[in-house]
Image: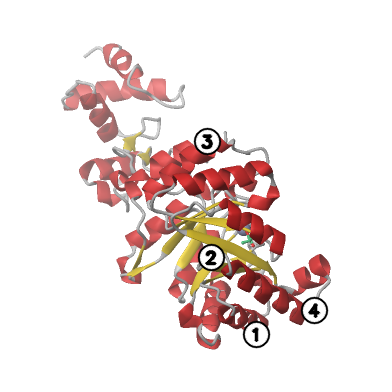
Amino acid sequence: MDNVEIFDTTLRDGEQVPGCKLDYKTKLIIAEQLDFLGVDVLEAGFPISSPGDYKSVKEISKLVKNTRVCGLTRAVKKDIDVAAEAIKHAKLSRIHTGIGTSESHMRFKFNLTPDEVLEKAVIAVKYAKSYVEDVEFYAEDAGRTDNEFLARVCEAVINAGATVLNIPDTTGYCLPEEYGAKMKYLMENVKGIHKARLSCHCHNDLGLATANSIAGVQNGARQIECTINGIGERAGNTSLEEVVMILRQHPKLNLDTRIKSEMLSGISKLVSESMAMPVQPNKAIVGANAFAHSSGIHQDGVIKKRETYEIIDPKDVGITESSIVLTARSGRAALAFRAKNIGYDLDKLELDKVYKQFLIVADQKKGINDEDLPKIIEASNL
Ligand code: KIV
Ligand code: ZN
């Protein structure tokens, strides 16, 4: 299996969610859990952006034991000075610097020619390299950047010492096929590409962030930038739990990560609660309904053999067991199963009677819980 590095940016790109600012103590708690989770790189913040962000990057650098700590900068010397200072206590550190490379960014954001952008990129990487060995370069809006120019930029920054090349689909525009082809193009056309690691950084504006990241690693990238619960600007970033479990559930891809997947559910709750940002119930892997079965046909299958309707063992992501939810769509198998769980072993005749009563109550209530069941059984005249 080839290893795909997980670059977590929950505390940087993820924290850019409006209204979800974290105080620095909470950031430390999350950083420690991300370290335990096994992320390879933790982007702790954008140190020049505020004194608060500087402080949290600095404290996270002191705290974290195994994970490489990374600070974001623009291709600006002052940014790089401040980031270098903030991460200087980290055991393993990285500076993440870069500049926009798409037509639109070069013309409207910077009013610079492609050659001027390329020069700034090289200067920034060389400058960052004077502080740390590990320098990641991002070509912002690479998703909409011409591949030939992108390859030129990549080659130049590798020669300047970049160890990782981040190819962000900043606006979440690419189709998986296109994003994968971009990675393939870079793998085949950038001289010296073997000296660096290509990284996927995908936004979710069209709901394609996860698919694009997987297409990226299928075409040669070996790092995915992602956040817990997929949080981030606008529609968010690639969701960490999704890419990790996709690689794990598909061994034929021959790719895996070092993530301890049993921690995924817990860390998802921690991030959601800390940011007061609920996870949608049908969210893959960590949503409340991800392992809940409510229709009779599915429940009957899962009770007989979990794998009939589940491709992931819930324990693998830190959930003790699948849940059999009782609603008016449930069947006798689910009712008998749930009744047995609370001590009622019903025979066939009894089950028929209880089921009749159950449907009357279930038609009036959204869900039947363990407190409702004994009352239903008592009212069934067994
Ligand atoms: O989406 C993006 O392009 C970014 C860069 C700053 C890496 O977040
Ligand atoms: Zn981003």
Residue topped by disc 3: 26
Q: Which of 318 and 161 is in front in this view?
A: 161
Residue topped by disc 4: 113
Q: Which amino acid does label 4 sit on?
A: Thr
Q: What residue type is labelled 3?
A: Thr
Which marked residue is nearer to the observer: mark 4 or mark 2? 2
> Residues under labels 2 and 1: Cα distance?
29 Å
Residue 145 found in image quarter: bottom right
Q: Residue at x 25, y 12 (%)?
A: 381
Compared across the picture, whether 13 is left or right of 2 comes to right
> Residues under labels 3 and 2: Cα distance?
27 Å
Q: Which of 149 and 27 is in front in this view?
A: 27
Compared across the picture, whether 186 is left or right of 323 comes to right
**Tag shown at residue 132:** 2
Going from the N terminus, do you reach mark 1 or mark 3 first? 3
> Residues under labels 1 and 3: Cα distance?
43 Å
Q: Nearer the viewer, residue 171 or 15?
A: 15
Going from the N terminus, do you reach mark 3 or mark 4 first? 3
Going from the N terminus, do you reach mark 2 or mark 1 first? 2
x then y, percent, for residue 121: 67, 73
Residue 300 found in image quarter: top left
> Residues under labels 3 and 4: Cα distance?
42 Å
Compared across the picture, whether 62 is left or right of 83 comes to left
Going from the N terminus, do you reach mark 3 or mark 2 first? 3
Above or below: residue 257 compared with residue 146 = above
- Is the Cβ of the residue at disc 2 closer than 8 Å to that at disc 1? no
x then y, percent, for residue 239: 50, 53
